[in-house]
Amino acid sequence: MTLWSGGRFEEGPSEELWRFTVDTSDRRMLVDDIDGSIAHATMLGGVGLLTPDEAAAMLETLGAIRDEAVAGRFVFIETDEDVHSAVERRLGEAIGELAGKLHTGRSRNDQVALDLRLYLKRSARSRIDQLSAFIRVLIDVTESVGDAVVPSYTHLQQAQAIPLAHHLLAYAWMIKRDIERFSDVMARIDVSPLGAGASGGSSLPLDVEASAELLGMTAIFDNSMDAVGSRDVAAEYVWCATQAMLHLSRLSEELLLWSTSEFGWATFSDAYTTGSSAMPHKKNVDIAELVRGRSAAVIGDLTSIAALQKGLPMTYNRDLQEDKRIVFHADDTLAGSLEALGGMLSTAEFHTPPPSDWVTALDLAEALVGRGVPFRVAHLLVGGLVTELIARGESFHDLTEQQLTEFDGRFEGADLAVFDVGASVAARSTHRGGSMESVEAQIRDLEAFLTLG
Ligand code: ARG
């Protein structure tokens, strides 16, 4: 039995219509839907649209249905068109005709908009918790690598000597912004659309402030048509998930690169790697590959939720039912990726080889600059020296004091000291650059952020 059969409809729905239009993915909003109904029924009682007895009976039963839902005992049946119909059907089984009063002053249009917002509020909180836990893992791994020095890369060419910890922490800051993005969108999620009705509100004395307050929502809609017809907040949520996935995908790519025998920087525990059915020697980092691979479909979700809104006339259109699959897919992919990649990362062991000598080239140029040589000249001199050494099949460490000073009188014997990558990192003094002082300060700030959050 649908919520609309009888009345204008002489015939029941065809199988084709049912198969095509019913989407059971909204069942995960069951508790949200019941919470919305509890708030709505309480409000109806408050304004006299339900008698105190009716309100009490309805609320008691809704509470029991909520318990069923939480315990996983709520049974959906074939004829439930959506989660809203299922709850009303269940209420009817328990209290008969009185259940018909629940939908007073409400439409599935404001109901579904509310359910989605309640779901997003819950899931934003758990994504924020997961992202915070991921930062924790990054900090722990960072601490475990100590002061190991690696090259930074630009254009995937070795650039400067930096602490590996500094590289890992770069991701912690990206993830921190992902958390902030989810928190920022929360203010726009936390707006109750209840009372907007089908699109234009109602002639009944609904108290929209009361139902919003009962739901613990911080604001109410400003325009009933906007409340039921807009999905920009869902799109923003998908964007938050997409950007977080993109960060995880970049990290995954690096972890994969670092675990190759060519790099040989990192290994992960057996429990988080897979074997090859054909090649006995292999250990594959599939989790990272799947995070990178699945981020593609989340980018697709972002396109889908944008395209879904394009050209939709006001207000609710059934197209909007599709928003949920998109949001759930993006959200589930992020949740699963954080869990798996976080687990894998926590088992990482780093054994980085020393960077090539060339990563100290800029340090040598800066030694000249310190003695008043214009940077452009210093760049030319060091570049010339590098060219000569490469031609001789040598590098900085092969240079003697005499060779260096004979190459150009502006070099000094003491400059040989800059070729040590540890010294290069130790000399790094600018704001949040690649030095261990910077790493320590970053960890302090990130930990303060996690404590405050
Ligand atoms: N299942 C629908 C959705 O997810 C619920 C709202 C249906 N409203 C309607 N007027 N048919 O969007």
Image (cartoon, rainbow, N blue to C red):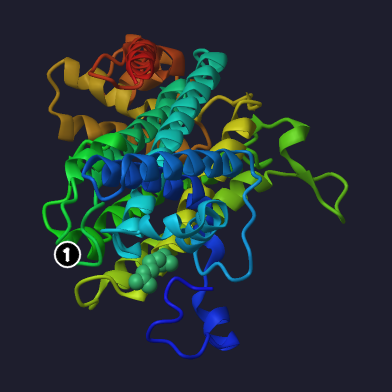
Q: Where in the figure is residue 280, as x and y percent of width and height?
A: 88, 47
Considering only vertical position in the picture, is 204 above or below 81?
above
At 46% across and 60% down in the image, what residue appears? 97
Considering only vertical position in the picture, is 216 above or below 305?
above
Q: Where in the figure is residue 152, as x and y percent of width and height?
A: 42, 32
Q: Is residue 13 left or right of residue 216?
A: right
Q: Is residue 431 left or right of residue 174?
A: left
Considering only vertical position in the picture, is 293 above or below 337?
below
Tell me the crowding category of disc 1: few under 14, some 14 to 19, or many 20 or more residues within 10 angstroms, Cα based: many
Q: Where in the figure is residue 439, as x and y percent of width and height?
A: 38, 16
Quadrant for the C terminus in the image: top left
For the residue pair 333 and 153, the one nearer the viewer reads as 333
Q: Quadrant of residue 181?
A: top left
For the residue pair 166 and 210, the one nearer the viewer reads as 210
Residue identifier under label 1: 225
At 36% across and 74% down in the image, what residue appears? 318
For the residue pair 122 and 410, the one nearer the viewer reads as 122
Q: Is residue 295 visible?
A: no
At 31% across and 63% down in the image, what residue appears? 107
Q: Amino acid at mark 1?
A: Met
Picture quadrant of ligand 1:
bottom left
Q: Where in the figure is residue 266, as x and y percent of width and height?
A: 63, 31
Q: Secondary structure at mark 1?
A: helix
Q: Quadrant of residue 127?
A: top left
